[in-house]
Amino acid sequence: MASIKHPLPADIMARASRGIAYISHPLRLRILEYLDVYGMSSVSAIARATNTEQVIISQHLRKMREANLLRTHRRGIFVYYQINEEYPASIFVCLRKLFGHMTDQLKFLKEDYRQILPTDYTTMAANRIKLFAHADKMRILEYLMYRDTSCVTDIASGTALPQIKVSQYLKKLSEDGFVSSRRAGRFVYYSITPGIHQTAIGCIHKRFDAVGDKF
């Protein structure tokens, strides 16, 4: 299981969770994936690639630009979109590696390998992201990656979240398959499970380690 060396500052995790929440939409994730694979592109190229009407693509591009996920370049009358370097684009590297492990397609495990993933996988990933894309949930998952198996009291202390909220979030995270639990006497201990949630947090940490407060 992947591990991390330190928890992120609370404001960085809050910022990261907002970005993660914003991409928890299948079409937005596919748009970002296309830009990650093919680089700076026009609305018409993205629309063709995703088989979506240009007006819908334009609406999502505008929202992602407002959220600082994208930046634009104008060439004459045309506007081209590109992933903003502050956005943790490395998540697609992690998604491809996770897909490679799931399907035994070893080409996806190669460094710098880029290929559009199957739409059903991208949709699944976006829908799974939506379930944990919340700052407090992500801090709990991050703590479990940092400290490994822990009880509610330790998680509450380590995340500075109220214990009752930690219990509520852990119940939901368990129902969604993001954590597992075991009972030892009167205590219940929680562990993070493998999957897109762990992958996303790992990518956020890699990005923070690379750019620090510029995240």
Image: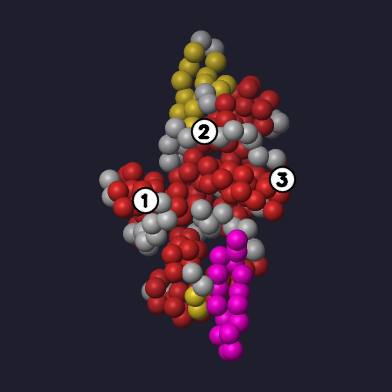
Front position in the image: 122 or 41? 41
Which of the two discs, 1 and 3, labels the residue nearer the N terminus? 3
In the shown orientation, is residue 117 left or right of residue 185? left
Mark 1, other Cα within 10 Å: few <14 / some 14–19 / many ≥20: few
Rendered residue at 53%/57% (across/down):
89
**Foreground disc of the pair 1, 3:** 1
Which secondary structure lies at badge 1?
A: loop
Residue at the front extreme of this rendering: 111
Residue corresponding to mark 2: 3
Residue type at numbered disc 1 = Lys
Residue corresponding to mark 1: 110
Residue type at numbered disc 2 = Ser
Rendered residue at 51%/72% (across/down):
40
Residue 209 visible in the snapshot: yes
Q: Could you tell me how far apart the alpha carbons at marks 3 and 2 are, in whole angstroms?
A: 21 Å
Q: Write down the region rendered in magenta.
A: 69-85
Q: Could you tell me how far apart the alpha carbons at marks 1 and 3 are, in whole angstroms?
A: 33 Å
Which secondary structure lies at badge 2?
A: loop
Mark 3, other Cα within 10 Å: few <14 / some 14–19 / many ≥20: few
Chief secondary structure of the magenta portion: strand
Q: Could you tell me how far apart the alpha carbons at marks 2 and 1 are, in whole angstroms?
A: 21 Å
Residue corresponding to mark 3: 11
Q: Where is residue 36 in the image (x, y as percent from the top left)?
A: 48, 63
Rendered residue at 59%/67% (across/down):
70
Residue type at numbered disc 3 = Asp
Mark 2, other Cα within 10 Å: few <14 / some 14–19 / many ≥20: some
Q: Position of residue 105 (x, y in %)?
A: 28, 50
